[in-house]
Image: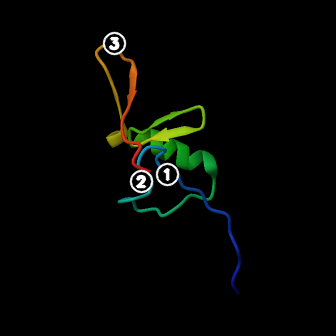
Amino acid sequence: MIQELTMYTILCDGCGKDVCEGSDYSAWSVASYVVDSAIEENWHVEDGKHYCPDCHEYDDEDKLIIRGGNK
């Protein structure tokens, strides 16, 4: 039997990288799990935006700097 399932992942708002890239998982069945995964992988997650480690950094005053934007 084939059954349709809803699965979740996060794509970087800067470059489009998938948070599951290089992971043992291709997606999560619960949206909050993929957010937890992104945070564990040092993604910046705030206000519905998600930036991979290659697309964000913090300056000396802990101000967020967004790089990327290649998407």
Position of residue 69 measured from the top left corner of the image (x, y, whole percent): 41, 43
> What is the quadrant of residue 43 in the picture?
top left
Q: Secondary structure at mark 2?
A: loop
Tell me, yes or no, whether the two marked residues, 2 and 3, touch with CB atoms within 8 Å: no
- Cα–Cα gap, marks 2 and 1: 5 Å
| Residue at the (32%, 42%) spot, across then down | 54
Q: What residue would you read off at disc 3?
A: 61
Q: Do callouts 2 and 1 mark residues in contact (Cβ within 8 Å)? A: yes
How much space separates mark 2 and mark 3, taking CA atoms?
27 Å
Q: Earlier in the sequence, mark 2 or mark 1?
A: 1
Decide if residue 38 is on the left or right side of residue 56.
right
Q: Amino acid at mark 1?
A: Leu
Looking at this view, name the residue that lies furthest to the bottom: 1
Residue at image location 49% in from the left, 51% down from the top: 11
Q: Nearer the viewer, residue 55 or 26?
A: 55
In percent of width and height, residue 29 lies at 62, 59
Residue 58: x and y in percent read 34, 24
Q: Position of residue 10 (x, y in %)?
A: 52, 51
Quadrant including the N terminus: bottom right
Q: Are marks 3 and 1 in contact (CB under 8 Å)?
A: no
Please tell me the numbered disc located at residue 11: 1
Q: Residue at x 71, y 78 (%)?
A: 3
Q: Residues within 10 Å of mark 2 (few under 14, many from 20)?
A: some
Please give the label number shown on residue 17.
Answer: 2
Farthest residue, direction front: 70
Tell me which label, 2 or 3, sits earlier in the chain: 2
Label 1 SS: loop
